[in-house]
Amino acid sequence: MIVIPRDYVIYSFSKKHVSKYRARPGDRIVFKTLDALGGQIVDESTPLESIDWSRVNPATGPLYVEGAEPGDTLVVEIESIEISDRGVIVVVPGFGALQDKSFRSRAKIVKIRSGKLFFNGIEIDVKPMVGVIGVAPEGDDIPTGSSGHHGGNMDVKLISTGTKVYLPVFVEGALLAIGDLHAVQADGELCVAAAEVSGEVQVKLDLIKGRRPRYPVIETMDGYAIITFGVDIDEAVYRASEEAVSILSRAFNIDFEEAYMLSSLIVDIRINQVVDPVKGVRAEIPKRFIKLDHLLYP
Ligand code: CA
């Protein structure tokens, strides 16, 4: 088993990175991860002004995957997620869905025990998920706090145990990195942070040669979700809709007009997050209507 320690981190996804860790398709790898704040919030009295923002959003990696070449798909199956017994939530003026309101910077530490998170007296079911998962992009470096065709800070609550993530490969070796675990996060991630935790993720890798999706794709028990992004939610929704209609057209061999109609009946557009540098949505299509093949392009 390959274990990548939590001090082996990147702050941008980049084709220029060189990795000392190598794996093959079929291998299992453990990524040990810091929380999204780089572990800098030790207690609720830590002033947010004291944080080194260059150490925020660390992603563990990169990992070089042997045989991965541009045009392929890297398949990352999330086999298990273990998280710490404390989470951190922050609010910072100028950030989040209500960023223009007048409020103070604040950090809150929450205890996590036996699958529950305790926020004051409120008990919330823990659903560990991966916020950042991505590969090196085709062009310029992309900070680990942002997202795009390469994946990155997608903050999709579906990326949890049992999920498969399909990432388009742009550079030799793919250069996979993972970080930013959340004990629990709702769609939207309104205040800019979820219950941020350190932990470890075990994944199993696979490779699909010569075909890849246009956007990162998530496979759950019930369906496929196409992850898109935009400067605002409207742009992200446009891209998700465009790709979903294109996939339906391929899957059923129907023209644009009919695929467009069908999309209104079977495609759910849902919000991932509204708070990151680019906003993210997903188009969910149930498995009974499409196959993985319809999501991949030569
Ligand atoms: Ca995040």
Image (cartoon, rainbow, N blue to C red):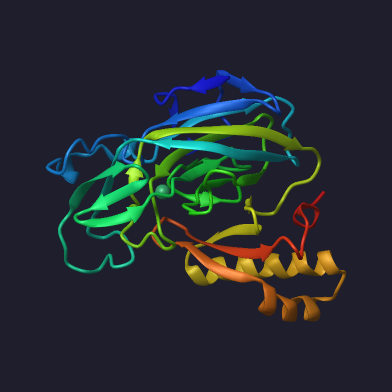
| Residue that appears at 39% across and 24% down | 7
Q: Does residue 225 sit above or below 16 in this rendering?
A: below
The N terminus - image quarter? top right
- Residue 167 in picture, x, y percent from top left: 65, 44
- Residue 16 in picture, x, y percent from top left: 56, 30
Would you say 22 lies left or right of 116 here?
A: right
Q: Does residue 47 sit above or below 7 in this rendering?
A: below
| Extreme residue toward the right, this view | 253
Q: Does residue 110 sit above or below 99 in this rendering?
A: above
Observer-nearest residue: 149 or 266? 266
| Residue that appears at 34% across and 35% down | 84
Q: Quadrant of residue 105?
A: bottom left
| Residue that appears at 84% across and 69% down | 252
Q: Does residue 57 sit above or below 29 in this rendering?
A: below
- Residue 184 in picture, x, y percent from top left: 39, 51
Figure disc tally: 0
- Residue 215 in picture, x, y percent from top left: 65, 54
Would you say 179 lies left or right of 51 here?
A: right
| Extreme residue toward the front, this view | 114
| Extreme residue toward the left, this view | 45
| Residue that appears at 79% across and 81% down | 257
Would you say 216 lies left or right of 115 here?
A: right
